[in-house]
Amino acid sequence: MKKRILGIFLCLVMVVGMLPLEALAEGSKITEIRLYSDTTSVQAGLLPEFTVTTTTPHASIDNVNTSWHYWHKTVNNWFGFGTSDPVAVSDGTHYGLRVCVDLEEGFSFD
C-alpha cells in the first residue's frame, strides 16, 4: 500500500512539474497599465525629454524603446523620428509617446 501511495505521489509531482509556472500563479494576467508623465503638452520646437512611470505591480517602463511619434495625416499612421532629434512644428500635427512596457516573467496582458 505504501508503494502505491508513493507511486501516485511521484506521478502527481511529475505532472505538476510539467505545468508552466504561469498556470500556478494567481493574477498572472494584467488588465490595466497605469501610466504617469509630467509631460502633458508640447510647444513647437525640440520635444522635451520625457519621464513616464507606472504604479502597476509587475510592470515597468522600458525607457530605451519609449519614443516620441507624430501623426502623419496623409498616411493616417504614427511615425517615429528615427535618429533625428524630435522637433514639433506648429502646423496642427499631433504628437505622442510610444510607451513600451515590460512585464515581470510569468505575467502577461489580458
Image (cartoon, rainbow, N blue to C red):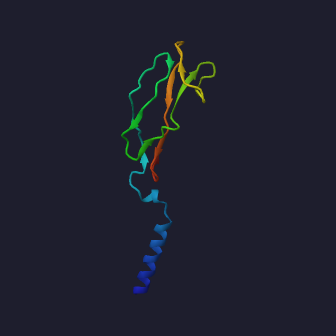
Is 8 above or below relative to 77? below
**Percent from the top left, x then y, of residue 85?**
56, 25
Above-or-below relation of 37 to 28 = above
Q: Residue at x 46, y 46 (%)?
A: 103
Q: Nearer the viewer, residue 3 or 68?
A: 68
Q: Does the rendering let one see residue 110?
A: no
Specify the farthest residue to the right.
75
Question: Looking at the image, which residue is at 40% across and 36% down?
Answer: 53
Q: Residue at x 41, y 56 (%)?
A: 25
In the image, 100 versus 28, the foreground residue is: 100
Residue 26, percent across and down?
Answer: 38, 54
In this picture, is 94 found above or below 106?
above
Quadrant of the drawing holding the N terminus: bottom left
Residue 58: in sight, yes or no? yes
> How many numbered circles are shown?
0
Image location of residue 65, percent across then percent down: 53, 37
Closest to the observer, 19 or 103 = 103
Instruction: Write down the quadrant of residue 80 in the picture.
Output: top right
In front here: 4 or 56?
A: 56
Could you tell me residue 83's position as x and y percent?
Answer: 60, 30
